[in-house]
Amino acid sequence: MIITIIILAISAIFFAIGKTRSDVVALCALISLLLFNILTPAEALAGFSNPVLIMMVGLFVVGGGILQTGLAKMISSKIMKLAGNNKLTLFLMVMLVTAVIGAFVSNTGTVALMLPIVVSLAAATQSNSRELLMPLAFASSLGGMLTLIGTPPNLVIQETLIEAGYPALSFFSFLPVGVICILVGIAILLPLSKYFLSKETAEDKTGGKSGKTLPELVNEYRLTDKLHRLIIPSGSRLIGHKMADLDLYNRYKLSVMEKRTEETVHGKLLRNISQTTVGAETIFKENDIIYVSGEKADAERFANEYTLSLTPINKDDDNADILEFYDIGMAELLLLPNSRLTGRPIRNTALRAKYHINVIAIRRKGDYIRDGLADVKLAPGDILLVQSSWDNIARLNNEEDDWVVLGQPLDEAAKVTLTYKAPVAAIIMTAMVAAMVFDFIPIAPVTVIMLAAVLMVICGCFRNVDAAYKTINWESIVLIGAMMPMSIALEKTGASSLLSHTLVNTLGAYGPVILLGGIYFTTSLLTMFISNTATAVLMAPIALSSATELGVSPYAYLFAVTLGASMCFASPFSTPPNALVMQAGRYSFMDYIKVGLPLQIIMGFVMIIVLPLLFPL
């Protein structure tokens, strides 16, 4: 028992110091329990096969699919527009929309999604974004209490109850608690954020930004100024022709930006889009959509001669929606002084043949060249705007000494939302939630979540399988899998019983409500130094033992654990959302103390009153 407590204490110290990654600390603790024969290998590895852990992996993927398809952004941005120019309404919408999304998507993903929307809306309404970003982070944690899958500690207490033989919680068992948390959060944060966070700073809001986004490149090079959309209808003379047969630039002074194929299923509900760059061997087919750059008169002449449909492009639209980047992207290449391409016209550089890229514009000493590119001779210091598939762009950074790739194009690729797959993601998420709420499919929740995650990948809600894997926070998964056996060790050695017995003896004498408060605030204090999920894993069995020893229902006590683990607002480092908004809102550590600590304390006292009413002791 003493060895187990020492290992736990040392782990807690390393967690609090934060110099070593939390997953490494957890693995070291796990190995120590093995070396001292406290756990068998089977017990030590049980955490990595626990249904809670598998459910978390699946939920990361499902949440990633919702973000990658832009579904959450589309919903949130439309709802946020209802706020208009009223600052109070904007604050309420930020809180409510973030909380609702946080009930189904990880709180980190929710904040990453909402942060740019909130900043832009604050600018549009001349509001101070500092008054909104910290409440945004806190709202994502508050929303996690609305559903079973809203936050990992909820899954932890569910598993603790099931293993102890108690009836499982339903998907919306958390809803009353979550609603109260949100109402308390709004009531406390509205005056506190106005009073403590309203001071403007002189720092540039976009300071430290590197590289350019894809829409910024489109705007800078004015790529849509002479862009035209051509559709190949049935009977067109272009069907079956190769690009090499057309001599498009010499005959029409046109350049092909991309070829797109769109298939619509069931009206406009479901769509599938394929994008490709056009090479010499590209063959045009019926219903292909071609985007060409050039003068309108030349585009009309080409359309008339080949019986094409020239459809207008609304230049008032967001340029990112005119030129989309699902399968193909753009990057800037800076030619080095000793580049072998210097002095050659672009047509003789073999860039298309070797790297399958198209040069669509050149920036030279502040001037932008978009016409007649094939005959332009390259000069040192030229910046080439190139277009190709994302895989080909990735190769550019690895295989040449003639240029430097500017910015982080692959990071920008990861931000591109596959909006045409949003209806698919919506159907999968709705079906998953329905299956868990109504139990119309006689299979375990972990199976439902795994199925939903796989469907997100199979149905194309991610660009590729690797993109799905990248949505999983592996540090959190390893941390939780390695810390779960700690609870086994605490129970096996009697440490858990000792801790719960101590709590009961010291606080239980004053009544079950006082003991409930002790469990809440102990969990809340630990979460300031240890991750919320690890804290829940450690405290859940202690709370269960305390309730059993006192002879009361464990539900309120376990809810105190998940609330104490999730409602941690007094530090920027206690949860990832708090840390995410720190730089964007230009907050100091004391800002979190001034706003977050009162909320954390008041929330605790409210829950000590509310939990026994919702879950009688």
Image: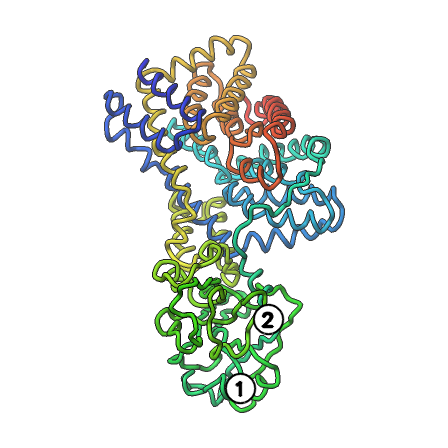
Q: Can the viewer see residue 427?
A: no
Which of the two residues, 581 or 345, is positioned nearer the viewer here?
Answer: 345
How far across and how far down the image is residue 111, in percent?
A: 56, 43
Seen in the picture, residue 575 relative to 374 is either above or below; the reply is above
> Disc 1 marks which amino acid?
Tyr
Which of the two residues, 584 or 565, is positioned nearer the viewer here?
Answer: 584
How far across and how far down the image is residue 575, in percent?
A: 51, 34
Seen in the picture, residue 430 relative to 320 is either above or below; the reply is above
Seen in the picture, residue 327 relative to 185 is either above or below; the reply is below
Query: Are dots 1 and 2 in contact, CB under 8 Å?
Result: no
> Disc 2 marks which amino acid?
Thr
Mark 1 crowdedness (10 Å alpha carbons): few <14, some 14-19, many ≥20: some
Residue carrying label 1: 252
Mark 2 crowdedness (10 Å alpha carbons): few <14, some 14-19, many ≥20: some
Instruction: Tell me: 127 left or right of 427.
Output: right
Residue carrying label 2: 224
Helix, strand or loop status at disc 2:
loop
- Residue at 54 percent across and 35 percent down: it is 174
How far across and how far down the image is residue 351, in percent?
A: 39, 71
